[in-house]
Amino acid sequence: MRFAFALSSAVAIAMSAGAWGQEAAAQRPVTPPLAISSLSGSDLFQFYCAPCHGHGGQGDGPVVPSLKKQPPDLTAIAARNGGHFPSEALVRFVSGEDRLVAAHGSREMPVWGPIFQSLEPRDRLTRIRIENVVAFIESIQKP
């Protein structure tokens, strides 16, 4: 009988501790990942670009109020370029190859080339990620 009581007490204590541990874990802030491994242009856009450019790419992301400059509407790139979507120019821009000279002012947009490079230190996958993001942006162009 004593054994049964001791066992049930131990189980009750363990369950209480487990519930407390779960409650404490639920109260801890969740830190989002700094990187994703997906190569999908849509996934990459939603993770890296949507905070500023918005989920639909229209420059209405949730962090816009904290930015000094309104992000451009990425759905109108082709329209701003006479109906032509400048894929290669955008790849160079996103990768940081076509960065502004510091004397001409700074850009708030991060340079994604080095960030993607840090995910996978092989140039091929960095280029694929950037090309996939650009292809996604091309896919959301307004007619």
Image (cartoon, rainbow, N blue to C red):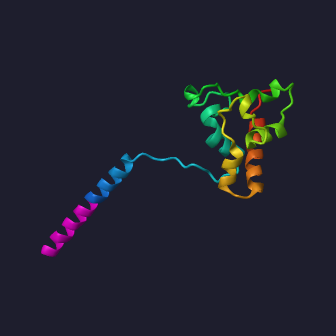
Q: Is residue 142 magenta?
A: no
The residue lying at 84 percent from left, 40 percent from top is: 88
Instruction: Pick out the residue farthest to the front.
Output: 103
Instruction: Pick out the residue farthest to the left.
Output: 2
The vertical placement of 101 against 34, above or below, is: above
Give coordinates of residue 142: x percent, y percent: 77, 27
Q: Is residue 2 magenta?
A: yes
The residue lying at 48 percent from left, 47 percent from top is: 31
Give coordinates of residue 122: x percent, y percent: 74, 58
- Image quadrant in which you'd find residue 131: top right
Give coordinates of residue 21: x percent, y percent: 32, 56
- State which quarter of the image contains the N terminus: bottom left
Judge left or right: residue 85 versus residue 107: right
The residue lying at 24 percent from left, 65 percent from top is: 11
The residue lying at 55 percent from left, 49 percent from top is: 33
Looking at the rendered structure, the number of numbered marks drawn on it comes to 0
Give coordinates of residue 18: x percent, y percent: 31, 59
The vertical placement of 64 against 117, above or below, is: above
Camera-nearest residue between 13 and 36: 36
Residue 87 visible in image: yes
The vertical placement of 104 against 130, above or below, is: above
Judge left or right: residue 128 versus residue 54: right
Camera-nearest residue between 11 and 29: 29
Main SS of residues in magenta? helix
Judge left or right: residue 128 versus residue 108: right
Camera-nearest residue between 80 and 138: 80
Q: Which residues are magenta?
A: 1-15
Residue 1 visible in image: no
Camera-nearest residue between 53 and 110: 110
- State which quarter of the image contains the C terminus: top right
